[in-house]
Amino acid sequence: MGIVSIFPKSQTSAILMRLHEASSNDIFKNLYCINPLFLFESMKSYLAAAIQMTTVPDLQKNLAQAEELIDLAVRQGAELVGLPENFSFMGEEKDKLSQGDAIAFESEKFLKTMAQRYQITILGGGFPVPVDSTGKVYNTALLIDPNGQELARYHKAHLFDVNVPDGNTYRESSTVMAGTQLPPVYFSEKLGNIGLSVCYDVRFPELYRHLSDKGADVIFVPAAFTALTGKDHWQVLLQARAIENTCYVIAPAQTGTHYARRQTHGHAVIIDPWGTVLADAGEQPGIAIAEIKPTRLEQVRRQMPSLQHRVF
């Protein structure tokens, strides 16, 4: 029987391999051939939240702010929650390094506590984890399940070394070591396949095509986008990544003034596979919350099967 699929060829072969590994019974393959929606049948519709914060150079104050916003998201029904890049600390680079061990320990502990307390899957969108004998840290995104178990970890690969036209100069690589591994996709039966990325990664579409090839349905882009670049580039880049990979994009964000001249754009958003902005947190701390629907994924991938038409 030939395979007619709503997925790109790379996803189809990867998914069928996973089904084959799960069981030697060919019924799984046959079910997929008959009904492409078979692969979405275990995935449910659910609410996801992208949290927007104004993080400052005070670890405990930031964790208290994050907990308040997580509580708000859960009370509105969110089952998948994302915190932005630098959710636990945003200050001078020298302070980040000197407090690196404490920030890393407290951040991971906090994520596991929140996941268990609220029975959610939660992403800590980026916090410093010291790298032995280097004097630097990894900018680390961490996905935790409702039992407090680590599901996926990603070290930000693309570092923000940019002279921004507003006069600010950023040299992330002065204190951060670039990750050397492509980001993971966590395969979740209920929430869909979740891909990770961080902030500046969004300007590199090949990273997201990798996530798409691995079967991603939902992609996180936690960020601390600068105020100047954000107003022109933030939303359009996120929409492009959603459209070209026919995935949901969940983009938690930083907003406002954090210290000295460091200002961020805000507008945490959730975007559907068609590129439609489903929720936007605006410019104040808060949440963007929206429904993630497997039926919408199937619809868009059927109506616009561009990934199947790739030549290269």
Image (cartoon, grey):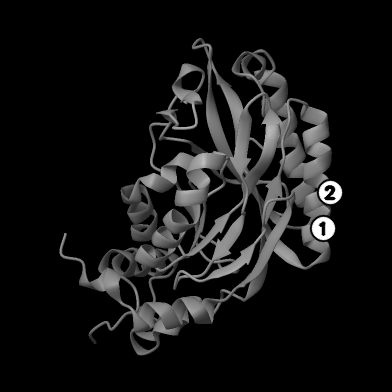
> In which quadrant is the N terminus drawn?
bottom left
- Residue beneath label 1, please? 72
Q: Secondary structure at mark 1?
A: helix
Vertical comparison of 94 with 62: above or below: above
Furthest-left residue in this view: 311
Residue lying farthest to the bottom in this orientation? 34
Distance, label 1 to label 2, CA atoms, is: 6 Å
Q: Residue at x 49, y 12 (%)?
A: 134
Q: Position of residue 191 (x, y in %)?
A: 59, 66
Residue 225 visible in the shown view: no
Q: Position of residue 190 (x, y in %)?
A: 60, 69
Of residue 4 and residue 29, the one placed in the foreground of this image is: 4
Residue 209: image quadrant is bottom left
> In the rendered view, would you say 269 is above or below 196?
below
Name the mark on residue 286. Answer: none
Residue 225: percent from left, percent from top: 54, 41
Q: Residue at x 81, y 42 (%)?
A: 65
What amino acid type is highlighted by mark number 2?
A: Glu
The quadrant of the rendering that contains the C terminus is bottom left
**Does residue 281 show up?**
yes
Please indicate whether residue 156 sits to the left or right of residue 50 in the image.
left
Please state which of residues 29 and 100 is positioned toward the viewer in this rendering: 100
Q: Secondary structure at mark 2?
A: helix
Is label 1 in contact with label 2 (beta carbons under 8 Å)? yes
Name the kind of residue labelled 1 in the image.
Leu
From the viewer's side, name the closer residue of 225 and 108: 225
Label 1 Cα neighbours within 10 Å, binned few <14 / some 14-19 / many ≥20: some
In which quadrant of the rendered view does residue 6 lie?
Answer: bottom left
Q: Which residue does the numbered mark 2 point to in the structure image?
A: 68
Which residue is rendered at x = 48% and y = 42% of the image? 229
- Specify few, some or many for label 2: CA neighbours under 10 Å numbering under 14, 14-19, or 20 or more: few
Horizontally, residue 172 falls left or right of residue 3, namely right
